[in-house]
Each structure stands twice: as C-alpha cells, then as structure tokens.
Image (tube, rainbow, N blue to C red):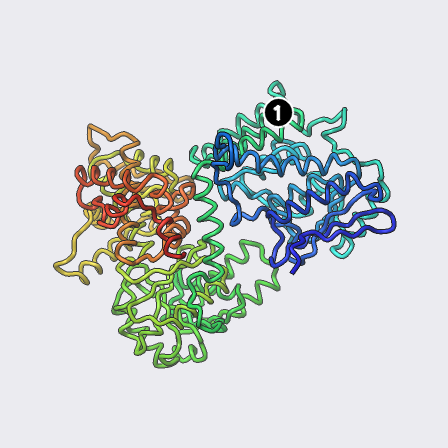
Amino acid sequence: MSDTTIRQDLDADGILLLTIDCPGLSMNVINEGLTRDLAAAIERIRTDAAVKGAVLTSGKASGFVAGADLKGMNFSGGGTGEGPKKSRAAMIYEASFGLNAMLRALETCGKPVAAAVNGLALGGGLEIVLACHYRVVADDPKIQLGLPEVLVGLLPGAGGTQRLPRLMGAQNALMYILQGKNMSPQEALGFGVVQELVPRDDVVALATAWVKANPTRATQPWDEKNFRFPGGVGHMNPAYAQTFMAGTAIAHKQSMGNMNQIKAILSAVYEGCQLPFDTAIRIESKYFAKVAADPQAGNMIRSLFVSKQAAEKGARRPKDEPPAKTLKVGMLGAGLMGAGIAMVSAQAGIEVVLLDRDLESASRGKQYTADRLAKKRTDPAKAEAILARIHPTADYKDLAGCDLIIEAVFETREIKADVTRATEAVVGADTIFGSNTSTLPITGLADAWSKPENFIGIHFFSPVERMPLVEIIVGKKTGPRAIAKALDYVAQIRKTPIVVNDSRGFYTSRCFGTFVQEGLALLGEGVKPALIENVARQMGMPVGPLAVNDEVGLDLSYKVAQQTKKDLGDAYRGGPGEAVIETMHTLGRQGRKNGKGFYVYPEDGSPKYLWPELSAYFPVSATQPTPAEVRERLFYRQLVETARCFAEGVLETPEDGDLGAIFGWGFAPFTGGPFSAMDTIGIAEVVNRLDRLAQAHGERFAPPQLLRDMAERGETFYGNAQRKAA
C-alpha cells in the first residue's frame, strides 16, 4: 500500500488538484505523512511554472480533514545529538510553528489556491481551509466546520486563533473558539468564513472554476495594505476592549480559572490580532507550546479523546464473541430512568416494549419521549417514527421476542427479584438481562435469574438522553456473551461505556457518593453551606454536593442507606453525613422533586437558593476552614475511594476510572480524571496528603496499601498500565 496521503493531478489549464486521502484511515487526519506531503505540494505550487493555481479537496466520503492525529502526537522533549537539550516547550513550539509556517507558505505562494470542502473540517482541517484564498463548501447542514481544540485542553495551533478573527471579528470568533462550537456551512457563509455553498458533487468544479477565473487573486485579505479588522481591533478600540473585558469574566466564570487553554486562547487572540500576521502566528505557537507542555493538556487528550474513542470502539469487549446487535429491548419500569432509556433506544432504531405496573404509567413513560422530541423541535415525521417504536404495556407477555431486557424499577431487592422472575417466565433465561441498579450488587440480583451468566449491570445516568456514560457491571458469574451484548447495545445508542466489576455501589455511585458524603460531613461539622458549594464548583465539579443531593433526591439517599443497613447488618458502618440525611428526611425535605431540600425552589421558577433555616438544624461553627482546606477534603476523598476501587479489583484499568469519573459524576475534567490527577500530583505526595487527612478527619481518608506500595516503587497508574499492555 502506498504511503502517499495526497494525490496530485495537473489539468490542461495548469490547475493542480490536491486530493487528501490518508491510506488505511477512515478519516483524514494531520499526521506526519500528510504534513510531509502537503509541504511538498506547496513547494510544487510555488516553484513549478506549469502550475497556475491549486484546489485542495478530500478523497474520503467521511469528510475533509478531522484535525490533528492526537493519538500520534509526540511532544516529548529532550533533544538528541550534540549541544544542549531543548526543553519540552521548545520542542512543541518548533513542531507547532512548523505547521503554522507551512500554511503561511501556502497562502503566500503567489498563486491562487481554493478549498473544495466536501465534508467536515475540524481543528487543523479547518485551519488548512482558512489558509486557502477561496473556500467552497458543500451545501449540506450535516457538515461541521470548527475549532474544537479547547475541548481536549489545547488551542488551535495552525493559525486558527488569527485567521478566524480576521474573517469574522474577534468577538464572533471567540464565541466559537472558546466553546469549541461548530458552524454549519450556512453559518460559515453568513460570517464570511467561506465564500460559496454549492451541491456536494460540484465543489471541486466550482473551486477549480474560481482558480481559473482569478489567476491574480493570490493574496489573503490580511496581507492587503488597506485591510480592516471586522469589528475593529486595538487596545484603544472600545468594542475590542469590551470584548475582552466581558469575555475574560465570562470565561473565568465558566472555567473557574482551572483550564490553561482558556487563558491562552484569550491571550493569543488579544495579542495576535494587534500584530502583523507573521508575528501573530508566532504568538499563537508560543501559547500553544505553553499549554501543550503542561501535563493538563496531555491528561485531557488521553481521557477525553484517546480513551473515550477506544472505549466506544470496543476496547473492553470480549474479542471472541460475535456481534450481538439489539433489535428489540424490553424496558421494565417507565419512570424517569426507564423512560429515558426507552427514548435513546428508540432513537437508535431499536423496538422498545415499555412495561410498568399499569398501562397508564407505561404510557406516561412514552409521553416523556414525545415531550422531549417536541421541545427539541424534532421533524414531525422523524418524531412519529421514533414514537412508533415504543410500545407501552402492563402485560409481561408482550416481552416475548425481546433479545435484551433492561430493568429500572425501584431500588429495592425484593421488587427487582419479582420483576426479574416474571420476565424470565416469558423470555427465557437465555435472554440477556441487564439491571439499571445504581447501588445493589449485581451478583446478588442475579440470583433471581436462573442463568446468572446472562445477567449483567447496565447502569445509566440521569437524564439518560443527555448523560454520555453507561457503566457496565460484571457480576461474579456474568459471562462474556452478556458483556458483549451490553457493550454492543451501548454502541448502538452512541454512549460511552466503562466496564467494572461488582461491588456495592460499583464504581461511579460509590465514588460519587464520597463527594456528596464529605459535603454533608462538612455541613454537619458547622461549615457554612455556601462555602461548601462554592469551593466544590471552583475545584471543577459541575455543582456542589448539597445541590447534587437535591437533584438525586434526599429520599433516595435515605432509602439507599436503609437498604444498605438491611443488607450488611452488623457489618454496616454509617458515613459521617448520614445524620444530616436522616434529619432532612424527618423534616420531609426531599430535594428538587418536592421543591425543598438543602435549597429552596420557588414556585414562580425564579433561581433556587440555599434554605435559610439550615443553620437552625446544622449550626454554623465560629471557626471556619479555609477554602483550600475544604477543597482538599472534597478532592482527596474522591481520590482515595477511586484508588480503593482499583486496589479491590472493582476497576481493572485507569482509563475506565478516569472516563467514569469525568462522564459519570462530573469529576473535574481539566485533571483528566482521578487517576491522571494522582499520577500528575505524584503518588508519594498523594499518600502524604491522605495520611494527614486521615489523622485529622478519620479512616475514610486512609490510603490503601496499593498506593503505599506504588509510592515506594515510584510507580504511576498509567505507567503500570503501559507496562502491563506491553
């Protein structure tokens, strides 16, 4: 197979068609081969007198270019050979500016170059397009154009922070770059980012026609003498100054100052847009190197991109099991969770039998989908097709023919056992049965299914249609066929799976619970509730522990504790926040569901606020901890529990742990997850911190022996995983 990534075809008029087609890949990406071939093509355009102009397009139906090959990025520093070794940041700067300089050579080659964009162009792919003098895009609303680097801890590093503001203005460009938002072709045309929309089959022909008709149009607007920046530029320009005054405040509010790439993007755009373009791209490369050299970016790329993609492509799927596509799912329980699971299943083209105790309850579950489709303004014909796949019923006989069962009834062992047995009587024990329980051990629940090897945990998160994670729980007797079936189903509904082994609370509920419990413990100790909530958000959690407890339901927290007490008997050890939940239960405060919990939820829909009478039941101490002390407790309580899950074998890989934390309970994404965080902090330092916290606050902070052994040997979680894989 040829390793050439660009086909070059010169027509009779001297127009060089460059067709990007990376061999062996489903999608074009900027890798070493494409960079090499694109540089050679640019040199040919510049020096070959037979070439009058060029058109860049893609040879793949999947899109134009999806961005840089993040998996293949190697920014390890150190240098080789004679002379002083270069720093990691210096190595990254050279790599980044090399790409920047190459695209600058494209737009200053002296000959017209047009982009014929026939599919998505993201990240570096869009930056290639922006370096062309004319941009023709297929008129297809499904095509996406954007710079999503911010979502994985980076910033655009091939001119994106400089060209996009010069085309659409700094304010508009920042809205897209800071959020990683994509544009449709129509939006891009409206902003002046592209010049022409045409049918997909005509993009190359129209781009070629423009090059032929404009032999002297080989200059970008920003290289022309009278160029004026859209919306104005310069620190004395009122609109420009206001953009960055407001933008900085909004960005800080959203990121809490935790994300390096946010600050770098603002700085690169602010500084670069006031400088000549050749200097501006050096500014961009400088900030790119600074961000990429920090461990934060590497952690985010690994978890939010590499590990996520691997999980979605079946990294944990049993290799010898044949494909197990789900055609018809039986959904037991039409409450909030069951209705949500029915919705995402039907949207994926799967038939759903939605069963509840009576037809009215089951029909309400179907109405959940109807309401949300209407709210999203889904095309009526499409909505009708989705709803037609959901069949509400109260009769177990209607489950006949289902090839996957998912149970989401009350979190009570007896009720779950009853519906499990009733289901098996209809579908047979060879059908795969998945329980959506969030806390009850799968091995025990499987006792109600005569073939426990076909019983598995399939744990969704609420609201199902928005939350991306599904936790697959393997019981002691769960077989590979059940694992494969569950993972194939998760792939069908386009969620991200992790695979964990059985335990009470599994991984996500167990570790997320420690965040909530530590918040309750702080409240019970007399820490101001506003301090607890604000510090939690400042450390990167989406909401504070009191707010999230309200969302989950204080009554559910109480019921789970009671079931756990019943199951464990004398072995039960209550957490430090249990008394707080019992007090709230006695007061009848259930959380958002009844409008009163730790917060008050006004009936007029105005913003919630902390219940003023909390201090009457949980008196505020005269001496308050510092925000740093509160943060340390909330953060390290989660770290130690994730480490325990690894030590106990609940988790088998740090990748599952980091994915589950970020996408399951919202653990600070800028860290890359708890295992990435521990590796970055250093295991020895983590152990030291935990020992000090355990001495001050109790054994719940005591590090497991695994951490002590790793600290002594100087190991890391991901270092061990790589050695094991090798």
Residue 335 position in % (x across, y down):
39, 62
User: Is residue 584 among the parts visible in the rendering?
Assistant: yes
**Horizontal relation, residue 165 to residue 674: left or right:** right
Q: Which residue is drawn at 82% across and 47% down?
A: 15
Is residue 618 shown to the viewer in this render? Answer: no
Q: Position of residue 17 (x, y in %)?
A: 77, 50
From the image, tell me which residue sits under label 1: 239
Q: At x 22% / y 44%, what residue is drawn?
A: 701
Residue 306, relative to residue 236: is it above or below? below
184 sits left or right of 645 in the view: right
Where, by quadrant of the figure, is residue 104 drawn? top right
User: How many C-alpha atoms fall within 10 Å of the one at disc 1: few (<14), some, or many (≥20)?
Assistant: some
Q: Residue at x 27, y 33 (%)?
A: 629
Q: In x, y percent, where is residue 371?
A: 50, 58
Residue at x 58%, y 46% (from the top left corner): 68
* Camera-nearest residue between 291 and 560: 291
Relative depth, front residue between 234 and 122? 122
In the picture, measured across the screen, residue 599 lies left or right of residue 195, that is: left
Q: How many numbered marks have been drawn onto this rendered protein structure?
A: 1
Q: What residue type is labelled 1?
A: Ala
Q: Is residue 554 above or below residue 431?
A: above
The N terminus lies in quadrant: bottom right
Q: Residue furthest front?
A: 82
> Please, what secondary structure does the residue beneath circle 1 have?
helix
Percent x, y for residue 422? 33, 77
Pick the quarter of the image with the C terminus.
bottom left
- The answer to whether residue 236 is above or below residue 159 is above
Q: Furthest residue to the left?
A: 570
